[in-house]
Amino acid sequence: MNKVIKIFAGIISLFLIYTNHLGAVEPPFLKFSNDEWVNKQLDSMTIDEKIAQLMMLTAYPTQNDASKNKVIEQIKKYKPGGVLVMQGGPVKTTSWINEFQENSKTPLLIAIDGEWGLSMRIDSTVEYPYAQAIGAVKYDAFVYQMGRDIGNQLKDMGIHMNFAPVADVNTNPENPVINFRSFGEDKKNVANKAWQVAKGMQDVGVIPVAKHFPGHGDTHSDSHKTLPVLTHSKERMDTLETFPFRYLAEMGISGIMSAHLDVPSLDDSGTPSSLSKKIITDYLKNEIGFSGFVVTDAINMQGVRTQSGNAELEALKAGNDLIEFVPDLNKAIESVKNGIVRGELSTAEIDEKCRKILALKRWVNLNEYQPTDIKYLRHRLHSPYFEMTNRQLVKGALTVLKNTDNILPVEHLDSFRIASISIGSDNITTFQRTLEKYTVVDHYFLPKDASERDLSRLHVLMEDYNLVIAGIQGINVYPSRQYGTTEIQRRAVSELTRKNNSIAVFFGNAYAMKHFENIENVQGLILAYQNNELTQELAAQLVFGANQANGRLPVTVDSRFQLNDSIEVASNSTLSYTIPEEVGVNSGQLERKIDSIALLGVEKEAYPGCQVLIAKDGKVIFHKCYGYQTYEKEQQVKKENLYDWASLTKVTGPLPALMKLVDKKEMNLDAPFSRYWADFDGSNKKNITVREVLAHQARLASWIPFWQMTLDKQKHLSSSVFKHNPSSEFNVRVSSDLYMNSHFRKIMYDTIRNSKLLPRSRYLYSGLSFYLYPDIISNITGESYEDYLKKNFYRPLGAYTITYNPYKYFPMKDIIPTEKDDLFRMETIRGYVHDEGAAMMGGISGNAGLFGTTNDLAKLFQMYLQKGYFGGRRYISEKTVNEFIRIQYPNNNNRRGLGFDKPLTDNYRNSLKDAYPAIDASANSFGHSGFTGTFAWADPDNGLLYIFMSNRVHPTRENQKLYQLNIRTAMHQAIYDCLKDN
């Protein structure tokens, strides 16, 4: 959790603590009980209209206009108090609500069952975690914010009342109706979480209704189908089942919903609790002291059927103020009127209840009703700020239950051969695709209906791996049929986790874990509570340490996993993947700015396609591809594509190795370069230092066109240097069918040795020394240069795509092509390095030659940005990184660090067209560009990483539009503009 979020959480938590200790609070709507508008409405109503105000109709916007018109007809005829909306889409539902209001004499209270937000009833809306997952969340501030978010979304649709939160304490794991809908089995946790949600909604002007009083958490049957019986003593009911409701009443919640339960200790007549005066009036209102309004659970449920069919009358007599889901409004009104005539209910009681309903309407500003604007409604309902809350809740809920030998987070990535298995899924999942962002992972899946043969085959395949990460899916939310799991699914978990070094992530109801034998034997176990793409994504990030884990188990599963079990796991400074709002950036603004510049480059043919990655404070907030690999538009650019990094190789190939050697005191920056490259002894380069060379201050020539040295008099490649077929002598592969005489490398080195120096010491960018570093590094370490890099950097970082000569390891279709070379190699360069000199080094050079994905480049640069630390490992000392990224010769008009490029001197004074890089890039920022159209820049002062990848040299290097349009700098500055604007 970043610093901004921690501060926010702290402020909100202090506010909540303060307000939670002010004593009993009156529900806010009661202040309008004697309001002028309320009195006027009440005085103008007939007894039928007053009774109708206590009733709610139900509407299903998924149905056709005939259904809508039937509701409108009843509104006009009977003038009910409100409408409960059920299934539907956001726009259609809101349109219906507007029409209902338009046809109602008195504005309607619109209600919904939105326990995990609108998505419980309305499609295409934000789906917040189920209550069981919320029960695991440590920080109240996020739960409160969820309440606010849900409230604001309801208001955006013209909905005023939410039949939520569930305040039942679920002490029965087999509960067939509450179960995962409860915040758990700890009464205090349930009470607190319920209040945070309720307060959040209430604070933005939406009416929360806690349910199901006096407590539905220990029932064995479903009140939709029958009347459940609670046999607990009154003492137990007082201290456990009703505890959250007592707390909510004290805190000032507006509404409580009465459940259809038989509770003999509170009323031994067998009367459903929702129809019991002893329970609603005597117990809830008088003994507990609740002064808000009481609404029944759906009055059409089987658990509340009365012999005389007068449930509505009985509910009002019991003390309820509002009745939902009334199936026959006319019959209900007549039943109540007859009850008044018989003296069972007085008109004064009707007036009192009606006054409450009108006060509620006044509190939600229905006295100034305006139709809801449906323009941009979907956009408003999907505000990224709502997603940010959702992400914090999902992260906060993730609960680590096993962490043997601290296997979580997974580090030392080079030591693992990893397989992922989705157990209970028919395909590769989001969870698995997210895992592969961190390292190489081979994916498998085992469907719920898999055969014995499938399972046996999987066992054999897993023998090749030393770490198996299993995502357990396909788990139903309710207990029937062992939560819908299959024997093969349960066996797979039991057998695979017992035999392998393993991590399991359980994407389902916590109670369902009791059906999985041996799951406690895994080395790492994460409970994710439910199964959706966001949960899968964030659980995968937790596996590798992108986020911390502090969720606590809100229920007891069995003897293995008990209430409040939790193992906290710290994050380890690897990359996380999130949305811009999490770091205070507006995603819409950022995307518009980046899109416009990137697409301009595509439109103007500065490049056929490109890729942009932006990370802030270690969080990747933007990664998007544009265009195609070539102008023929046959293959779109994809995130898994590998680019030729060109001169970015200088700071990603030899440089990390040199920094490590400096750390180990095996290289002295101020020693003569000739100490490490003996060939310079006795030459004009004998005394130049390593520092001077790396800072481009050594008077070296900028470059040497080695390939042109091989041309004969007819300007053809010399046959003594190049052949089209390999041999023992011609064994340096330059391209797909061109091989160089290995002896020519000595000529290249001699040419560098004998090259002239500039007459005086000044800055001149030179790539010559970078041809030499691979051999220097190999000589010092005693290892192959490429092997050394992969062993010490790329593989531990999980950056397995970073490599020289990618044609050896990856399909050509995944490698972005560069130039159509019609002078030297006579082919379109793809999978081989574009730079001619690097090609003549067999593709392995310090000046160019590295390829990799944008994501893997981000890992390496984020390590630099974090001063040598990444993913729980120190690669380079902070002191050494700081030395390499600082300007070395500021008095010589040389902006360079050691190997790294730096901003132009006084760059902040430049106009955008003259700046390099962005004007707002700090003086401490650093990076490098590549000739093929690549760019990477890190800014430690702003915690910002920007990577731009393109193949602007395709089909020709003569294309200068990338520079002419100033694409990379303009885009870089646009990012800073977004940071400043937010």
Image (cartoon, grey):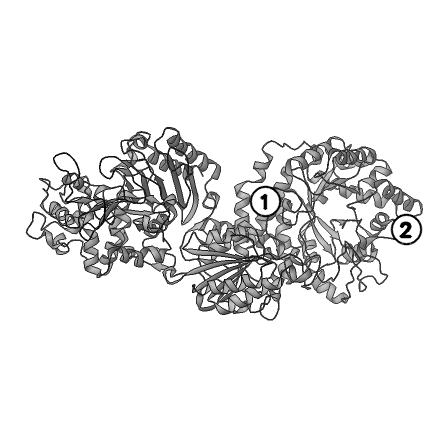
Q: Quadrant of residue 332?
A: top right
Residue nearest the observer in this picture, 677 or 245: 677
Q: Secondary structure at mark 2?
A: loop
Counting every numbered tag in the picture gives: 2
Q: How crowded is the residue under tag 1: few (<14 C-alpha within 10 Å), some, or many (20+)?
A: many
Q: Say whether disc 1 or disc 2 marks the residue closer to the N-terminus.
A: 1
Say what amino acid the circle numbered 1 marks. Answer: Val
- Residue 644 drawn above or below residue 70: below
Query: What label sits on residue 126 in the rendered view?
Result: 1
Residue carrying label 2: 308
Q: Residue at x 30, y 29 (%)?
A: 964
Residue nearest the observer in this picture, 423 or 288: 423
Q: Name the spot of residue 152 as percent of width and height, x first.
A: 61, 41
Left or right, 74 with respect to 400, comes to right
Left or right, 229 with respect to 944, comes to right
Q: Residue at x 35, y 58 (%)?
A: 796
Residue nearest the observer in this picture, 815 or 336: 815
Q: Name the spot of residue 112 as percent of width and height, x first.
A: 69, 44
Q: Name the spot of residue 13 as percent of width and height, x first.
A: 54, 53
Q: Secondary structure at mark 1?
A: loop
Say what amino acid the circle numbered 2 marks. Answer: Ser
The quadrant in which the C terminus is found is: top left
Q: How crowded is the residue under tag 2: few (<14 C-alpha within 10 Å), some, or many (20+)?
A: few
Q: Residue furthest right?
A: 342
